[in-house]
Every structure is written in structure tokens, then in C-alpha cells.
Image (cartoon, rainbow, N blue to C red):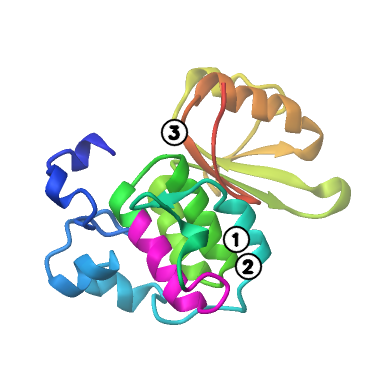
Amino acid sequence: MDVHHAENSAASALLATYCALCGLKLRDARSVECGVGPDCRKAHGYDAPNREPNWDAAEKLLEGVVLCNVALTSEPAWRSDARAFANRVIVLIAIEQTGPAVIKATNALCVLGFEKVAVRVAGRLAKIKIELEGEGEQQFYVVRAPYSEGFLRTPGRKWDGVAKVTRFHKSFKAPLFAALERNYQGHVALGPKGLFQIAG
């Protein structure tokens, strides 16, 4: 668990004490039970899935992820009730807050139909954001990342002073990802395919 949440005692380690979406301390029983505070439940589509669940994609993403020593894909709601199952995924995120299981769980929320919730969690976790813009030969990676002198020297980098983002033509994908690994090793990033941890 994150040092920020180290105050959790062994007795409360399986209770959600911080919001899965914003990371703030939960202050009421309902919020502790579901892992999300009242403001975040209201603002980020907690009760309303955006689309039908893709159970096969969720199963791949959640392989090896456990909550209370039980594989998430062994939960009673698995493949039968997306809302109830998403609740368990959100509780895992609220308890763990960071780490590989949280990255997998956040991506799984998206394919379970809770995109708005997943986007909010991803926004909290990822300090680096990578998007694809344009089409064909005019496709660019748009990168938002904390300042790094080394990253500024990446071949193919173009600064967009109006949008305050760094752009790389798609032909510079390899140098871009090599630079991310050199300068942001271990950081969580949000890319076109979801959350991931930068290797290195």
C-alpha cells in the first residue's frame, strides 16, 4: 500500500478508508462500504454504466488479481451482474490505492462499462498522459508529462506552446517510448489502450 495510507491497521486493512476515485479519506459507513465518497459517486457515474460489459476482456485484465485472498473472477457476481462485480473491483482499488492490481482493476472497470469511473481513477493515478491525434500520416502522439530535462532531448519531440503539450509524429513511437522508460521508469501512465506502468 501507498505510504500515504500506512496508518491503516491490520484490523482495518481490508476496509476501504480512502476513496478509489479521488484518494481522499472516506468519512461515512456507506462510503467505506463501497469505496467511493458521496461527491465522487454523484459526479463520476458510479451508479450508471456507460455500456454493456465485455466479460472476456475483463477476465484477461483481472487474471491473478485477488481481494481478501479470493480471485476477483471467483466472485458470485462474476459474469452475471456487472454493477455488483464493479463494486468489488472499486473496493479493491479503494483498499490498494496504487500498484499493478489497481492498474489492472481500473482498466477492467472500463471494459465492464464503467468508463467514467475508470477515467477518474486513471486521472488520479497517471501523471503521464499519452493520446493519439489525427489519422494516417498526420497521426501524432500527444504527451503530457512532468518536467524532465532528459525527456526534452528526445528525437522527434515538438513542443506545442498553445496546447502546452509535447507532440511526436507516429514514426517516432520507438524513441518516444524509449525516452519514457529512461526518464519516467516505474511511473503510471495513461495511454490509448488504458493505464500501464512504464518499464525500464
Q: Out of 62 and 155, give the one closest to the viewer.
A: 62
Residue range in magenta is 77-92
**Residue 152 seen:** no
Residue 32 is drawn in which quadrant?
Answer: bottom left
Of callouts 3 and 2, the N-terminal one: 2
CA–CA distance between discs 3 and 2? 35 Å
Residue carrying label 1 = 58
Residue drawn at (62%, 78%), measured in percent from left and top?
52
Of callouts 3 and 1, the N-terminal one: 1
Residue 8 % position (x, y): 14, 45
Residue drawn at (31%, 74%), measured in percent from left and top?
41
Q: Nearer the viewer, mark 3 or mark 1?
A: 1
**Residue 14 seen:** yes
- Asked if residue 64 is positioned above or below residue 81 in the image, the reply reads above
Q: Is residue 84 left or right of residue 157?
A: left
Dividing the image into 4 quarters, which one contains the N terminus?
top left
CA–CA distance between discs 3 and 1? 31 Å
- Asked if residue 71 is positioned above or below residue 189 in the image, the reply reads below
Q: Secondary structure at mark 2?
A: helix
Residue 9 % position (x, y): 12, 43
Q: Residue furthest bottom?
A: 48
Task: Residue type at mark 2: give it.
Answer: Trp
Residue carrying label 3 = 146
- Label 3 crowd bin: few (<14), some (14–19), many (20+), radius 10 Å: few
Q: Residue furthest right?
A: 137
Residue carrying label 2 = 55
Rendered image: mark on residue 70: none
Disc 3, disc 1: CB below 8 Å?
Answer: no
